[in-house]
Amino acid sequence: MSTHGKILIVDDLSTHLLLLQTILSDEGYETEITDDPKTVVDILLEKDYQVVLLDIMMPGMDGFQVLELIKSNKKLKGVNVIIISAKTDSWSIKNALDKGAFDYITKPINIQDVRNKVKAAMIESIL
């Protein structure tokens, strides 16, 4: 199967993981899912991902902490992180972008919005 790139989806809710995986697999992306934020950096270092879809509110470690770990790792500087969160307040959005997120998608998700933002992040990571 030809792919348009690899995406790691991180969310503690399996329904969100499966929904996003279905949307993006249908678009031709290779996707992997994890519900454990502590494993994200290891997974990213193992395989060549271009984009991460990252939830903020997760047990053990929140998405902001995961984002900081990704952005502080020189080997992962080409990975674009898109935050997907139910947090719609301007502080959360600004905080995510300030910490290096490529974009921010609010839940409940708009499927076309997800497709467009992932495509933009994928193009950006290749350039």
Image (spheres, helix red, strand yellow):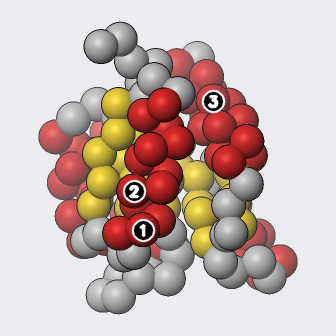
Mark 3 — residue?
A: 119
Disc 1 element = helix
How many residues crowd mark 3 within 10 Å: few (<14), some (14–19), many (20+)? some
Whether the residues at callouts 2 and 1 have beta carbons within 8 Å, the answer is yes
Name the disc covering residue 100, or none: none
In the displayed structure, 112 sits above or below 126; it is below
The tally of labels here is: 3
Nearer-N-terminus badge (3/1)? 1
Location of residue 118 (image quadrant): top right
Whether the residues at callouts 2 and 3 have beta carbons within 8 Å, the answer is no
Name the disc covering residue 15, or none: 1
Give the distance between the C-alpha atoms of the residues marked 3 and 1, in whole angstroms.
22 Å
Disc 3 element = helix
Kind of residue at badge 3 = Lys
Location of residue 17 (image quadrant): bottom left
Mark 2 — residue?
A: 18
In the displayed structure, 95 sits above or below 98; it is below
Give the distance between the C-alpha atoms of the residues marked 2 and 3, in whole angstroms.
19 Å
Nearer-N-terminus badge (2/3)? 2
Q: Is residue 77 visible?
A: no
Q: Residue at x 71, y 35 (%)?
A: 116
- Image quarter in which the C terminus is found: top right
Residue 38 screen position, x and y as percent:
24, 71
* Residue at the outermost bottom position: 59
Q: Residue at x 30, y 87 (%)?
A: 60
* Residue at the outermost top position: 2
Please give left or right for residue 110 compared with residue 100 in the image.
Answer: right
Kind of residue at badge 2 = Leu
Disc 2 element = helix
Residue 77 screen position, x and y as percent:
44, 40
